[in-house]
Image (cartoon, grey):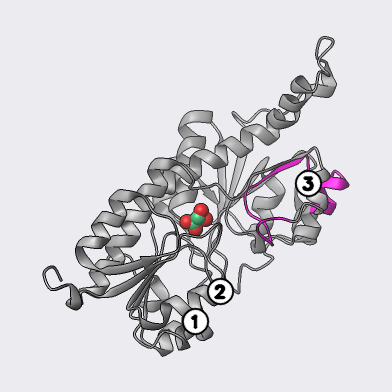
């Protein structure tokens, strides 16, 4: 693809990416990129994609309307491991390749999950604000105490690569007992981390910490709702760093308000960015983050480079390393 500029495939970069990644793309493709504030508006993307062969994307919905507007499109490369933004049937119907960025973010997301577990259990954000707002005027007492993470029972729902990275930290860093629920049993994780397989019901009932890590699919939409919160211990800490729609957010709010569970640590929401009026933001027993699971400088750079390599490989007529499984 090097050499004659006119022979280079045309791509659109819909998300800011590091310079090194842009330079890599320049060697192989002609490109235009989104340089506006915030997320690219749909109508701009529809216009820009018209003559492009490839799209480097972060979260924009890839549906029939977009694909109709892009007759030359051959590949959509997500800078994310999640690909619930893909309309799989629409991509299949047009024979368009869809790729994602697995592996490079597993440890980073697992670190954040532990951050949420520790913050929610030890009330780190709440008590940080207590100090900063001048309320610390006497020795702390029982009303400030939290829960232990070490030696507690961790329930992992969705034992994929990130689930396993969480299990590793739990087992070897925090001496936790691990239960898990997954579509298939993971014998390797059982052997490596002593993880014990159980039904969703069992995992919810027996765990002190419940970490939800399933991808968003038709089957996992609102996987955790009122019935599931009712099964959890009153001392349970619930963590969601997968996708907001895997949880019925109203049921989560009720569970926290009515103290059906002890606390939650949340990185993903049904609507992102979350509305400031969302009652979740009024609660002390929830730690709320703005979907930063993979957001470290190094990991986001690695994700962008992985996505760029998927894009360039597909456009050179070869099979990219990370085609999403439904499109293989
Ligand atoms: C992913 O890669 O799917 C993450 O959620 C993006 O932060």
Relative to 286, residue 213 above or below: below
Whether tag 1 and tag 3 are in contact, CB under 8 A, the answer is no
271 or 209, which lies in front? Answer: 271
* Residue 245, numbered label: none
- Nearest-to-viewer mark from 1 and 3: 1
Residue behind mark 2: 42
Residue found 33% across the figure and 65% down from its top: 322
Residue 254 highlighted magenta (yes or no) = yes
Q: Earlier in the sequence, mark 2 or mark 3?
A: 2
- Residue 246 location, x and y as percent? 64, 62
User: Number of marks in the image?
Assistant: 3
Q: Secondary structure beneath disc 2?
A: helix
Whether tag 1 and tag 2 are in contact, CB under 8 A, the answer is yes
Q: Which stretch did the figure color magenta?
A: 253-274
- Nearest-to-viewer mark from 2 and 3: 2
Residue found 42% across the figure and 60% down from its top: 79
Q: Secondary structure beneath disc 1?
A: helix
* Residue 66, numbered label: 1
* Residue 281, numbered label: 3
Q: Residues within 10 Å of mark 2 (few under 14, many from 20)?
A: few
- Which quadrant, please, contains the N terminus? bottom left
Residue found 69% across the figure and 65% down from its top: 222
Mark 1–mark 2 distance (CA, rounded to whole Å)? 9 Å
């Amino acid at each position: 693809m090097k050499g004659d500029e006119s022979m280079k495939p045309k791509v659109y970069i819909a998300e800011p990416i590091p310079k090194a990644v842009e330079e890599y793309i320049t060697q192989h493709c002609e490109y235009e990129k989104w340089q506006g504030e915030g997320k690219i508006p749909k109508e701009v993307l529809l216009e820009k994609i018209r003559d492009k062969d490839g799209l480097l994307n972060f979260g924009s919905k890839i549906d029939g309307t977009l694909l109709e507007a892009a007759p030359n499109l051959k590949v959509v490369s997500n800078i994310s491991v999640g690909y619930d933004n893909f309309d799989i049937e629409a991509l299949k119907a047009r024979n368009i390749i869809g790729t994602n960025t697995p592996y490079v973010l597993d440890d980073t997301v697992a670190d954040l999950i532990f951050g949420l577990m520790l913050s929610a259990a030890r009330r780190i954000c709440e008590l940080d604000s207590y100090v900063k707002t001048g309320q610390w005027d006497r020795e702390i007492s029982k009303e400030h105490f939290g829960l232990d993470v070490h030696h507690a029972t961790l329930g992992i729902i969705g034992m994929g690569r990130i689930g396993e990275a969480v299990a590793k930290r739990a087992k070897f860093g925090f001496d936790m007992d691990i239960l898990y629920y997954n579509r298939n049993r993971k014998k390797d994780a059982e052997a490596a981390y002593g993880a014990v397989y159980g039904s969703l019901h069992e995992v919810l009932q027996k765990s002190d910490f419940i970490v939800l890590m399933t991808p968003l699919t038709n089957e996992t939409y609102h996987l955790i709702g009122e019935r599931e919160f009712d099964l959890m211990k009153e001392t349970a800490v619930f963590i969601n760093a997968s996708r907001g729609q895997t949880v019925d957010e109203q049921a989560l709010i009720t569970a926290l308000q009515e103290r059906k569970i002890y606390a939650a640590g949340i990185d993903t929401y049904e609507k992102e960015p979350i509305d400031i009026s969302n009652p979740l933001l009024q609660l002390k027993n929830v730690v709320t983050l703005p979907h930063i699971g993979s957001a470290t400088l190094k990991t986001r750079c690695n994700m962008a480079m992985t996505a760029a390599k998927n894009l360039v490989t597909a456009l050179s007529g070869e099979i990219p390393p990370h085609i999403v499984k439904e499109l293989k």
